[in-house]
Image (tube, helix red, strand yellow):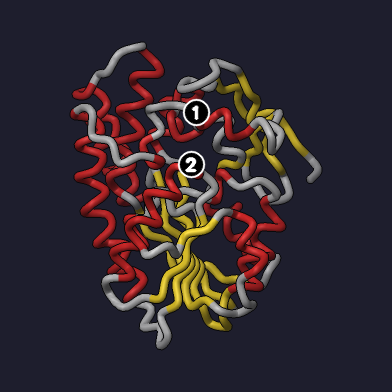
Amino acid sequence: MKNKSIFLSVKDHSVSGEEFKLIQNSEYGFLETTPQPSLEKLPTYYESEDYISHTDSKRNLFEKVYHLVRTFSLKKKLSLINSFLSEEKHLLDIGCGTGDFLQIAQSNGWTISGIEPNSEARVIANSKTNATVFDTSQLSSFKKKSFDVITLWHVLEHLPDLESQIVSFKKLLKPKGRLVIAVPNYNSYDAKHYKEFWAAYDVPRHLWHFNQESISKLMVTQDFEVEKVKPMWFDAFYVSLLSEKYKSGKMKPIKGFFIGLLSNLKACSSKEASSLIYIIKNI
Protein backbone atom coordinates (compact mmCIF):
# COMPACT_ATOMS: atom_id res chain seq x y z
CA MET A 1 0.00 0.00 0.00
CA LYS A 2 1.31 3.44 -0.86
CA ASN A 3 0.97 7.16 -0.15
CA LYS A 4 1.29 7.08 3.62
CA SER A 5 1.61 9.82 6.25
CA ILE A 6 1.90 9.72 10.08
CA PHE A 7 -1.44 10.30 11.81
CA LEU A 8 -0.59 9.65 15.48
CA SER A 9 1.84 7.89 17.84
CA VAL A 10 0.13 5.48 20.25
CA LYS A 11 1.38 3.33 23.13
CA ASP A 12 0.39 -0.27 23.86
CA HIS A 13 -1.18 0.40 27.26
CA SER A 14 -2.28 -3.14 28.11
CA VAL A 15 0.64 -5.51 27.41
CA SER A 16 4.03 -4.34 26.14
CA GLY A 17 4.26 -0.57 26.73
CA GLU A 18 5.77 -0.23 23.25
CA GLU A 19 4.99 2.75 21.02
CA PHE A 20 3.59 2.42 17.49
CA LYS A 21 2.84 4.86 14.69
CA LEU A 22 -0.55 5.12 13.01
CA ILE A 23 0.07 5.69 9.32
CA GLN A 24 -2.73 7.03 7.16
CA ASN A 25 -3.24 5.47 3.75
CA SER A 26 -4.45 8.04 1.25
CA GLU A 27 -5.80 5.38 -1.12
CA TYR A 28 -8.39 4.02 1.32
CA GLY A 29 -8.31 6.35 4.32
CA PHE A 30 -7.74 3.75 7.05
CA LEU A 31 -4.83 3.90 9.50
CA GLU A 32 -2.15 1.20 9.70
CA THR A 33 -0.36 0.24 12.90
CA THR A 34 3.37 0.50 12.16
CA PRO A 35 5.49 -1.50 12.61
CA GLN A 36 3.17 -4.49 12.51
CA PRO A 37 4.31 -7.49 14.56
CA SER A 38 5.28 -10.63 12.68
CA LEU A 39 2.73 -13.44 12.54
CA GLU A 40 4.92 -15.37 15.01
CA LYS A 41 5.11 -12.51 17.52
CA LEU A 42 1.54 -11.19 17.22
CA PRO A 43 -0.03 -13.79 19.60
CA THR A 44 2.26 -12.62 22.43
CA TYR A 45 0.46 -9.26 22.46
CA TYR A 46 -2.76 -11.05 23.44
CA GLU A 47 -1.18 -12.73 26.49
CA SER A 48 -2.98 -10.78 29.17
CA GLU A 49 -5.53 -11.78 31.81
CA ASP A 50 -7.36 -8.56 30.94
CA TYR A 51 -8.19 -9.68 27.38
CA ILE A 52 -11.84 -10.34 28.22
CA SER A 53 -13.08 -11.73 24.89
CA HIS A 54 -10.84 -14.81 25.28
CA THR A 55 -12.26 -15.78 28.67
CA ASP A 56 -15.57 -16.09 30.50
CA SER A 57 -14.12 -14.62 33.69
CA LYS A 58 -16.12 -12.26 35.92
CA ARG A 59 -13.47 -11.32 38.46
CA ASN A 60 -14.51 -7.73 39.13
CA LEU A 61 -17.27 -5.18 38.58
CA PHE A 62 -15.79 -4.09 35.24
CA GLU A 63 -15.88 -7.64 33.85
CA LYS A 64 -19.34 -8.29 35.29
CA VAL A 65 -20.70 -5.18 33.56
CA TYR A 66 -18.96 -6.24 30.34
CA HIS A 67 -20.72 -9.61 30.40
CA LEU A 68 -24.07 -8.04 31.27
CA VAL A 69 -23.81 -5.71 28.28
CA ARG A 70 -22.65 -8.61 26.10
CA THR A 71 -25.80 -10.58 26.96
CA PHE A 72 -27.95 -7.67 25.76
CA SER A 73 -25.77 -7.19 22.66
CA LEU A 74 -26.06 -10.86 21.70
CA LYS A 75 -29.84 -10.52 21.41
CA LYS A 76 -29.43 -7.43 19.24
CA LYS A 77 -26.94 -9.22 17.00
CA LEU A 78 -29.28 -12.20 16.62
CA SER A 79 -32.15 -9.88 15.75
CA LEU A 80 -29.97 -8.24 13.10
CA ILE A 81 -29.00 -11.43 11.27
CA ASN A 82 -32.58 -12.76 11.52
CA SER A 83 -33.76 -9.59 9.76
CA PHE A 84 -31.96 -10.71 6.58
CA LEU A 85 -34.55 -13.50 6.18
CA SER A 86 -31.97 -15.97 4.85
CA GLU A 87 -33.59 -19.18 3.60
CA GLU A 88 -30.88 -21.67 4.62
CA LYS A 89 -29.42 -19.66 7.53
CA HIS A 90 -25.77 -20.68 7.21
CA LEU A 91 -23.61 -18.48 9.47
CA LEU A 92 -19.85 -18.06 9.72
CA ASP A 93 -18.58 -16.04 12.67
CA ILE A 94 -14.90 -15.09 12.29
CA GLY A 95 -13.01 -14.39 15.50
CA CYS A 96 -15.83 -15.88 17.54
CA GLY A 97 -14.01 -15.76 20.90
CA THR A 98 -15.70 -17.99 23.47
CA GLY A 99 -18.62 -18.74 21.14
CA ASP A 100 -21.56 -16.94 22.78
CA PHE A 101 -22.91 -15.44 19.55
CA LEU A 102 -22.67 -18.76 17.74
CA GLN A 103 -24.42 -20.48 20.63
CA ILE A 104 -27.42 -18.14 20.57
CA ALA A 105 -27.59 -18.32 16.75
CA GLN A 106 -27.50 -22.12 16.83
CA SER A 107 -30.33 -22.21 19.35
CA ASN A 108 -32.35 -20.06 16.94
CA GLY A 109 -32.08 -22.36 13.93
CA TRP A 110 -28.83 -21.22 12.32
CA THR A 111 -26.32 -23.72 10.95
CA ILE A 112 -23.12 -22.36 12.44
CA SER A 113 -19.38 -22.40 11.87
CA GLY A 114 -16.77 -20.36 13.70
CA ILE A 115 -13.13 -19.37 13.36
CA GLU A 116 -11.07 -18.59 16.46
CA PRO A 117 -7.24 -18.52 16.46
CA ASN A 118 -6.86 -18.52 20.25
CA SER A 119 -6.73 -22.15 21.38
CA GLU A 120 -8.09 -21.57 24.89
CA ALA A 121 -11.04 -19.51 23.64
CA ARG A 122 -11.66 -22.14 20.96
CA VAL A 123 -11.97 -24.90 23.56
CA ILE A 124 -14.58 -22.87 25.46
CA ALA A 125 -16.44 -22.07 22.22
CA ASN A 126 -16.53 -25.71 21.13
CA SER A 127 -17.97 -26.74 24.49
CA LYS A 128 -20.93 -24.44 23.77
CA THR A 129 -21.47 -25.16 20.06
CA ASN A 130 -21.02 -28.91 19.53
CA ALA A 131 -17.49 -28.54 18.15
CA THR A 132 -18.25 -26.19 15.26
CA VAL A 133 -15.32 -23.80 15.85
CA PHE A 134 -11.98 -24.17 14.04
CA ASP A 135 -8.62 -22.46 13.80
CA THR A 136 -7.82 -20.11 10.92
CA SER A 137 -6.52 -22.86 8.63
CA GLN A 138 -10.12 -24.04 8.16
CA LEU A 139 -11.04 -20.88 6.21
CA SER A 140 -9.48 -22.23 3.03
CA SER A 141 -11.37 -25.54 3.42
CA PHE A 142 -14.90 -24.18 3.48
CA LYS A 143 -16.93 -24.64 0.31
CA LYS A 144 -17.17 -21.52 -1.85
CA LYS A 145 -20.43 -19.55 -1.72
CA SER A 146 -21.66 -21.59 1.25
CA PHE A 147 -22.63 -18.89 3.79
CA ASP A 148 -25.66 -16.62 3.90
CA VAL A 149 -24.09 -14.41 6.56
CA ILE A 150 -20.48 -13.84 7.63
CA THR A 151 -19.96 -11.82 10.81
CA LEU A 152 -16.88 -10.15 12.25
CA TRP A 153 -17.64 -8.52 15.60
CA HIS A 154 -14.62 -6.31 16.35
CA VAL A 155 -12.39 -8.67 14.40
CA LEU A 156 -11.48 -7.07 11.04
CA GLU A 157 -9.08 -4.68 12.76
CA HIS A 158 -7.12 -7.70 14.09
CA LEU A 159 -6.61 -9.55 10.79
CA PRO A 160 -3.29 -9.46 8.93
CA ASP A 161 -3.31 -9.17 5.11
CA LEU A 162 -6.42 -7.02 5.06
CA GLU A 163 -7.17 -7.01 1.36
CA SER A 164 -6.70 -10.78 0.97
CA GLN A 165 -9.14 -11.30 3.85
CA ILE A 166 -11.85 -9.40 1.99
CA VAL A 167 -11.18 -11.50 -1.10
CA SER A 168 -11.72 -14.65 1.00
CA PHE A 169 -15.04 -13.30 2.37
CA LYS A 170 -16.19 -12.73 -1.20
CA LYS A 171 -15.44 -16.35 -2.10
CA LEU A 172 -17.28 -17.78 0.89
CA LEU A 173 -20.41 -15.62 0.77
CA LYS A 174 -23.44 -16.57 -1.28
CA PRO A 175 -24.74 -14.16 -3.95
CA LYS A 176 -26.87 -11.52 -2.17
CA GLY A 177 -25.41 -12.72 1.14
CA ARG A 178 -24.49 -10.30 3.93
CA LEU A 179 -21.17 -9.45 5.47
CA VAL A 180 -21.59 -7.86 8.92
CA ILE A 181 -18.56 -5.98 10.24
CA ALA A 182 -18.32 -4.13 13.56
CA VAL A 183 -15.23 -1.94 14.07
CA PRO A 184 -14.18 1.10 16.11
CA ASN A 185 -14.58 4.45 14.35
CA TYR A 186 -11.62 6.84 14.61
CA ASN A 187 -13.87 9.72 13.48
CA SER A 188 -15.96 9.46 16.67
CA TYR A 189 -16.02 12.19 19.30
CA ASP A 190 -14.38 9.99 21.96
CA ALA A 191 -11.54 9.12 19.55
CA LYS A 192 -10.88 12.79 18.88
CA HIS A 193 -11.19 13.66 22.57
CA TYR A 194 -8.75 11.03 23.88
CA LYS A 195 -6.37 11.07 20.88
CA GLU A 196 -3.35 8.84 21.65
CA PHE A 197 -5.07 7.54 24.80
CA TRP A 198 -8.16 6.31 22.93
CA ALA A 199 -8.46 2.70 24.07
CA ALA A 200 -9.97 1.49 20.78
CA TYR A 201 -6.66 2.05 18.98
CA ASP A 202 -5.43 -0.93 21.08
CA VAL A 203 -2.11 -1.23 19.24
CA PRO A 204 -0.65 -3.53 18.07
CA ARG A 205 -3.56 -5.96 18.39
CA HIS A 206 -5.54 -3.60 16.17
CA LEU A 207 -3.57 -3.58 12.95
CA TRP A 208 -6.03 -1.32 11.10
CA HIS A 209 -8.26 1.58 12.14
CA PHE A 210 -11.31 2.53 10.10
CA ASN A 211 -13.73 5.32 9.34
CA GLN A 212 -16.86 5.04 7.17
CA GLU A 213 -15.15 6.16 3.99
CA SER A 214 -12.35 3.61 4.26
CA ILE A 215 -14.76 0.70 4.80
CA SER A 216 -16.80 1.71 1.74
CA LYS A 217 -13.69 2.02 -0.44
CA LEU A 218 -12.37 -1.35 0.69
CA MET A 219 -15.65 -3.11 0.02
CA VAL A 220 -16.10 -1.65 -3.45
CA THR A 221 -12.87 -3.37 -4.54
CA GLN A 222 -14.64 -6.75 -4.25
CA ASP A 223 -18.11 -5.68 -5.45
CA PHE A 224 -19.53 -5.34 -1.97
CA GLU A 225 -22.00 -2.57 -1.17
CA VAL A 226 -22.46 -0.98 2.27
CA GLU A 227 -26.23 -1.23 2.74
CA LYS A 228 -26.58 0.27 6.19
CA VAL A 229 -24.46 1.57 9.07
CA LYS A 230 -25.64 1.15 12.68
CA PRO A 231 -24.16 2.54 15.92
CA MET A 232 -22.96 0.44 18.86
CA TRP A 233 -23.99 2.75 21.69
CA PHE A 234 -22.46 0.81 24.61
CA ASP A 235 -18.97 0.92 23.10
CA ALA A 236 -18.56 4.65 23.77
CA PHE A 237 -18.92 4.06 27.52
CA TYR A 238 -16.63 1.02 27.63
CA VAL A 239 -13.94 2.67 25.50
CA SER A 240 -14.13 5.98 27.41
CA LEU A 241 -13.72 4.20 30.76
CA LEU A 242 -10.58 2.45 29.53
CA SER A 243 -9.30 5.63 27.88
CA GLU A 244 -9.59 7.52 31.17
CA LYS A 245 -7.54 4.78 32.83
CA TYR A 246 -4.84 5.01 30.15
CA LYS A 247 -4.78 8.80 30.34
CA SER A 248 -4.70 9.25 34.12
CA GLY A 249 -3.52 5.89 35.44
CA LYS A 250 -6.72 5.30 37.39
CA MET A 251 -10.36 4.51 36.77
CA LYS A 252 -12.55 7.61 36.57
CA PRO A 253 -16.02 6.11 36.02
CA ILE A 254 -17.98 9.36 36.27
CA LYS A 255 -15.80 11.22 33.78
CA GLY A 256 -15.60 8.19 31.49
CA PHE A 257 -19.38 7.82 31.54
CA PHE A 258 -19.79 11.53 30.77
CA ILE A 259 -17.46 11.42 27.74
CA GLY A 260 -19.17 8.25 26.50
CA LEU A 261 -22.58 9.90 26.84
CA LEU A 262 -21.37 13.06 25.12
CA SER A 263 -19.92 10.98 22.27
CA ASN A 264 -23.26 9.21 21.79
CA LEU A 265 -25.23 12.47 21.89
CA LYS A 266 -22.98 13.99 19.23
CA ALA A 267 -23.28 10.79 17.14
CA CYS A 268 -27.06 11.26 16.98
CA SER A 269 -26.45 14.05 14.48
CA SER A 270 -22.97 13.28 13.12
CA LYS A 271 -23.61 9.50 12.69
CA GLU A 272 -20.04 8.97 13.95
CA ALA A 273 -20.51 6.63 16.91
CA SER A 274 -17.55 5.17 18.79
CA SER A 275 -18.09 1.83 17.03
CA LEU A 276 -20.16 1.10 13.95
CA ILE A 277 -21.79 -1.98 12.46
CA TYR A 278 -21.62 -2.17 8.67
CA ILE A 279 -24.22 -4.31 6.90
CA ILE A 280 -22.60 -5.12 3.57
CA LYS A 281 -24.32 -6.84 0.65
CA ASN A 282 -22.63 -9.15 -1.82
CA ILE A 283 -23.60 -7.79 -5.26
Q: Nearer the viewer, residue 120 or 114?
A: 120
Q: Position of residue 49 (x, y in %)?
A: 39, 27
Q: CA distance from mark 2 to mark 1?
A: 29 Å
Residue at (49% x, 28% y) in the render: 47
Outermost residue on the bottom side: it is 87
Where is residue 57? Give x, y as percent: 28, 36
Question: Is residue 145 positioned above or below 222 on the image?
Answer: below
- How far across and how far down the image is residue 178, in percent? 49, 73
Say few, some or many: other residues with alpha carbon within 10 Å of mark 2 (under 14 / 14 to 19 / 20 or more): some
Dividing the picture into quadrants, the one containing residue 217 is bottom right
Q: Which residue is mark 1?
A: 47
Q: Residue at x 30, y 51 (%)?
A: 268
Label 2's element? loop
141 sits to left or right of 134: right
Provide the secondary structure element on which disc 1 rests.
loop
Q: Quadrant of the N terminus?
A: top right
Query: Outermost residue toward the right?
Result: 2
Q: Is residue 146 left or right of residue 72?
A: right
Q: Is residue 220 left or right of residue 263?
A: right
Ranked by sequence position, the earlier of labels 2 and 1 is 1
Residue 93 in view of the camera: no
Amino acid bearing label 2: Asn
Q: Based on the displayed image, in which of its 4 quarters is residue 182 positioned?
A: bottom left
Q: Which residue is mark 2?
A: 187
Q: Quadrant of the C terminus?
A: bottom right
Observer-nearest of 260 and 96: 96
Tell me the kind of residue under disc 1: Glu
Q: Position of residue 164 (x, y in %)?
A: 71, 58
